[in-house]
Image (cartoon, rainbow, N blue to C red):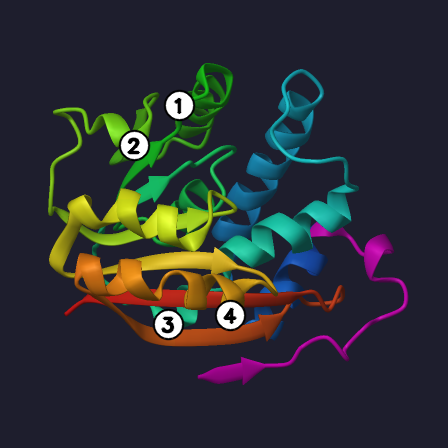
Amino acid sequence: MTHRNVSRETEKNWQAMPLDRLLIKAAQKLGLKLDHAQVSMLLTYLSELILWNKKINLIGPSTPADTVVRHLADSLAPLPFLPQGPLRVLDLGSGAGLPGLVLKTVRPSWTVTLCESNQKKAAFLKAMVKRLTLNNVQVLPVRIGQAPESLPLEAYDLITARALSPLNELLSLARPFLGSRGTILAYKGPRAEKELKEAEQVLTALGLTLARQERFRLPFLGHCRILLFFKGI
């Protein structure tokens, strides 16, 4: 397990930074280098997210600077631990596209399915795919448990979920869609250890194992985050 402690680098006026500089610095603290096109695309997404959030509940109240760190940087955090090449990705409970849509902007070779049952959120996702001119992105406005025909079983290289459900429920939902060499990536906070313990029997029953655990703190804010990577046995 790797510990990335970026919480001590707390520039006093980080919330007053230009958003592009803040995004670049936050990414750097997480071991990522974003190019100009990626930053531009992510800030376009951020602008639309803030605009839509006034009409529908996509994220909780926060400043643009907070959103850059709490949502964009947090969504991007696993990228140093993921392959560079093409992947087939399923994002469960995608919500505002966090993390699936954000990850896609930095990994254009990925083929991404965003699964979101809330119709208004799904409409936002479809609008953003068009606005950002993203290729190979599908928005499915369905509940994952319905297993629609358009969502193939045992087909995905990476299944992501952020703030979706307790770990034991998440793993049960994701397992049928996991490819033989695929990974389930769960974004968790301080309760991760407790949820892991509660999910021990589910892990065994599903034939899954915790392959990797990465602990870090959000840049500038210092909030604890834990990334859990599961694979089939």
Marks 2/1: CA–CA distance: 8 Å
The picture places residue 210, in percent across and down from the top left corner, at 31, 72
Residue drawn at x 46%, y 49% is 166
The picture places residue 207, in percent across and down from the top left corner, at 17, 63
10 Å neighbourhood of mark 3: few (<14), some, or many (≥20)? few
Sequence-first disc among 2 and 4: 2
Q: Contact, CB < 8 Å: mark 2 with mark 1? A: yes
What is the span of residues highlighted in magenta in the rendered image? 1-19
Residue at numbered disc 2: 144
Q: In what quadrant of the picture does the C terminus appear?
A: bottom left
Q: Is residue 223 left or right of residue 176?
A: right
Residue drawn at x 42%, y 54% is 167
The picture places residue 44, in percent across and down from the top left corner, at 58, 36
Residue drawn at x 58%, y 73% is 216
Q: Is residue 174 visible?
A: yes
Disc 2, SS:
helix
Going by the numbered disc 2, the residue's amino acid type is: Ile
Marks 1/4: CA–CA distance: 28 Å
Q: Contact, CB < 8 Å: mark 4 with mark 3? A: no
Residue at numbered disc 4: 193
Residue at numbered disc 1: 117
Above-or-below relation of 78 to 93: below
Marks 2/4: CA–CA distance: 25 Å
Sequence-first disc among 2 and 1: 1
Residue at numbered disc 3: 81
Which of pointers 4 and 3 indicates the residue nearer the eye? 4
Sequence-first disc among 1 and 4: 1
